[in-house]
Image: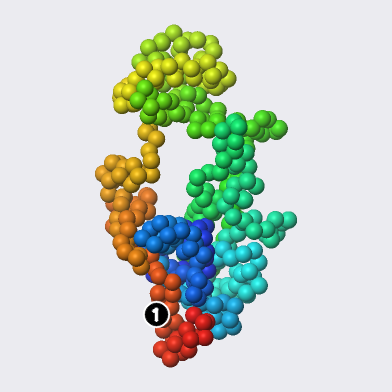
C-alpha cells in the first residue's frame, strides 16, 4: 500500500522535524528528494556514529530518500532548485528563521510558478510574533511550551528523553501535507502548511494546561508515576525488578484491593474511594502497595495483575525493546540498506498488512547526477557544477 506513488516531494531539510515528516511521506510511496549542502550535508549526519559509523538520528529519519547536494546560495544552485520545484508536488523546508523567504522560496512566490505545489514551512515558533527570529532546538521548545515544568521529579525537572517537539512538529507537518494533497485533489490548487514546534508541543500539553486552568496549580512533577492518577506508576518487587501498573477506574480498584493487596476493606475506605481521594493520599496508600510488591517476585506480581486484569508493564531497556516479542510477532522489523551496511528498521505504524517500503538511507549527494540529468543537464554540465562545488 503506497498511496503516494507518483507524488514528488522536495525537502530542504535538516535535523529531525522536516526529515521525520518527509520520511513518513516516503514510507507511503512518495519520491522524496532531500536537498543537502555539498560536502557537508544535513548536520544530523554528524550527531554521532552509533549505527555502523552513521548517525542514529540520520538513519532513523532518512530511509527511502534520494540525496541531492546543492548550494542554494549559488545562483546556479537556486535556479536548479526552482526548476525542480516547478515539477514537484510538495516542498518542505525547516531552514533557519527567514532563510527560505530570503532565498525566494516563500509559498506565494513558488506557487505563482507551480499553482499545485503544497508548501510546508516548519519553524520553531512561527511568524509573525516576537519569537519568530529565535533559534529553536528541541530542548528550547520543550522549555517554552512548559513541558519541562511538569516533567521530572519533585526536586528536579527533566527533558523528555526523545526529541518530542521535533517529532510533534514533524507529525503535524505530515498529516497537514496529506490533508493539503486531499484538498488539491478536489480543487487542483496547492496549499500552504505552516507548522511551529511550539504550537505542536503546546497542543500536546492539553491535559496539564487545562488542569491548571484559570490559575489552578499545575500537576506536580511525579517522576515515573502519573501526576494526578493513583496508583499509576512504578513499584519494586522483591527481586529488585520494577513493575509498572495502573488503576483507571473504581471497578479495577476494588478488584485490585481484593485480589492483589488481599485488603478488600481498602476498597470502601473513604480515604481511597475515588481517584481524587487516592491521589490526595498517595503517600499512605503507596506504602501499602509498595509493601505488597516487596513480598512478590516481579513475575508473580505481573501474573496476579494480569489475572485481575490490571494494566501493567515491564520497564524495558533499549536492548530488550530490540527483542520485544510483540514487535517480533507482528513482523515489524525489516532490513534497510545504508552506505555502511544493512540495519533493522521499524515499519510505518498503521499499515500492518502492507509490504513496507524500505529503500536505502542515502549517502550524501548519492542521487545528484541522476536528479540533475532528469532536469536536462548533460554529464559535462553536472561535472562542471561538481568541480565548482555547486553540487
Q: Residue 41, relative to residue 51: is it above or below?
A: below
Identify which residue is drawn at 41% across, 81% down.
Answer: 369
Locate the N terminus and report the quarter of the image it occupies. Answer: bottom left
Expressed as whole percent of the image width and height from the top left, the position of residue 360 reads 35, 65
Identify which residue is drawn at 55% across, 84% down.
Answer: 76
Taking depth in this image into account, of 33 and 163 the one nearest to the observer is: 163
Q: Can see residue 5?
A: no
Q: Residue 273, relative to residue 223: is it above or below?
A: above
Expressed as whole percent of the image width and height from the top left, the position of residue 140 reads 62, 51
Q: Residue 24, relative to residue 276: is it above or below?
A: below
Q: Quadrant of residue 374?
A: bottom left
Q: How many numbered dots are placed on residues in this image?
A: 1
Expressed as whole percent of the image width and height from the top left, the position of residue 116 reads 52, 71
Identify which residue is drawn at 37% across, 29% down.
Answer: 241
**Residue found farthest to the top:** 265
Q: Residue 177, relative to residue 115: is it above or below?
A: above
Is 276 displayed left or right of 323 in the figure? Answer: right
Q: Can see residue 352?
A: yes
Disc 1 target residue: 370
Identify which residue is drawn at 59% across, 38% down.
Answer: 157
**Residue found farthest to the bottom:** 380
Is 127 displayed left or right of 348 in the figure? Answer: right
Q: Secondary structure at mark 1?
A: helix
**Residue found farthest to the right:** 130
Expressed as whole percent of the image width and height from the top left, the position of residue 336 reads 32, 61
Taking depth in this image into account, of 71 and 214 the one nearest to the observer is: 71
Taking depth in this image into account, of 385 and 51 the one nearest to the observer is: 51
Taking depth in this image into account, of 309 and 224 the one nearest to the observer is: 224
Query: Is disc 1 surrounded by few (<14), some (14 to 19) or many (20+) residues within 10 Å?
Result: some
Q: Quadrant of residue 343?
A: bottom left
Amino acid at each position: 500500500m503506497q498511496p503516494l506513488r507518483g507524488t514528488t516531494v522536495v525537502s530542504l531539510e535538516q535535523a529531525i522535524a522536516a526529515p521525520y515528516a518527509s520520511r513518513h511521506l516516503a514510507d507511503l510511496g512518495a519520491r522524496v528528494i532531500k536537498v543537502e549542502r555539498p560536502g557537508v550535508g544535513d548536520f544530523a549526519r554528524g550527531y554521532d556514529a552509533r549505527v555502523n559509523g552513521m548517525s542514529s538520528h540520520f538513519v532513523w529519519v532518512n530511509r527511502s530518500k534520494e540525496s541531492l547536494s546543492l548550494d542554494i546560495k549559488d545562483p546556479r544552485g537556486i535556479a536548479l532548485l526552482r526548476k525542480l520545484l516547478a515539477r514537484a508536488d510538495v516542498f518542505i523546508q525547516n531552514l533557519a528563521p527567514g532563510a527560505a523567504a530570503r532565498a525566494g522560496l516563500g509559498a506565494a512566490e513558488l506557487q505563482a510558478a507551480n499553482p499545485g505545489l503544497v508548501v510546508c514551512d516548519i519553524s520553531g515558533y512561527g511568524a509573525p510574533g516576537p519569537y519568530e527570529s529565535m533559534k529553536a532546538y528541541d530542548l528550547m521548545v520543550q522549555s517554552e511550551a512548559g513541558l519541562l515544568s511538569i516533567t521530572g521529579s519533585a526536586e528536579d525537572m527533566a527533558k523528555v528523553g526523545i526529541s518530542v517537539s521535533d517529532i510533534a512538529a514533524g507529525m503535524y507537518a505530515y498529516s497537514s501535507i496529506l490533508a493539503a494533497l486531499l484538498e488539491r485533489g478536489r480543487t487542483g490548487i496547492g496549499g500552504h502548511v505552516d507548522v511551529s514546534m511550539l504550537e505542536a508541543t503546546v497542543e500536546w500539553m492539553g491535559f496539564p494546561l487545562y488542569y491548571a486552568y484559570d490559575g489552578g496549580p499545575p500537576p506536580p512533577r511525579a517522576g515515573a508515576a502519573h501526576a494526578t492518577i493513583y496508583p499509576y506508576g512504578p513499584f519494586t518487587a522483591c527481586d529488585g525488578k520494577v513493575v509498572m501498573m495502573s488503576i483507571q477506574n473504581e471497578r479495577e480498584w476494588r478488584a485490585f484491593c481484593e485480589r492483589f493487596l488481599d485488603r478488600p476493606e481498602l476498597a470502601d475506605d473513604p480515604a481511597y474511594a475515588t481517584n481524587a481521594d487516592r491521589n490526595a493520599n498517595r503517600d499512605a496508600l503507596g506504602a501499602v502497595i509498595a509493601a505488597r510488591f516487596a513480598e512478590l517476585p516481579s513475575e508473580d506480581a505481573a501474573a496476579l495483575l494480569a489475572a485481575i486484569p490490571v494494566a501493567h508493564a515491564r520497564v524495558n531497556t533499549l536492548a530488550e525493546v530490540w527483542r520485544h516479542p510483540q514487535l517480533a510477532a507482528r513482523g515489524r522489523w525489516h532490513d534497510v540498506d545504508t552506505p555502511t551496511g544493512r540495519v533493522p528498521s521499524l515499519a510505518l505504524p498503521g499499515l500492518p498488512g502492507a509490504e513496507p517500503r524500505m529503500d536505502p538511507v542515502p549517502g550524501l549527494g548519492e542521487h545528484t547526477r541522476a536528479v540533475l540529468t532528469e532536469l536536462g543537464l548533460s554529464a559535462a554540465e553536472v561535472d562542471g557544477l561538481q568541480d565548482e562545488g555547486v553540487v
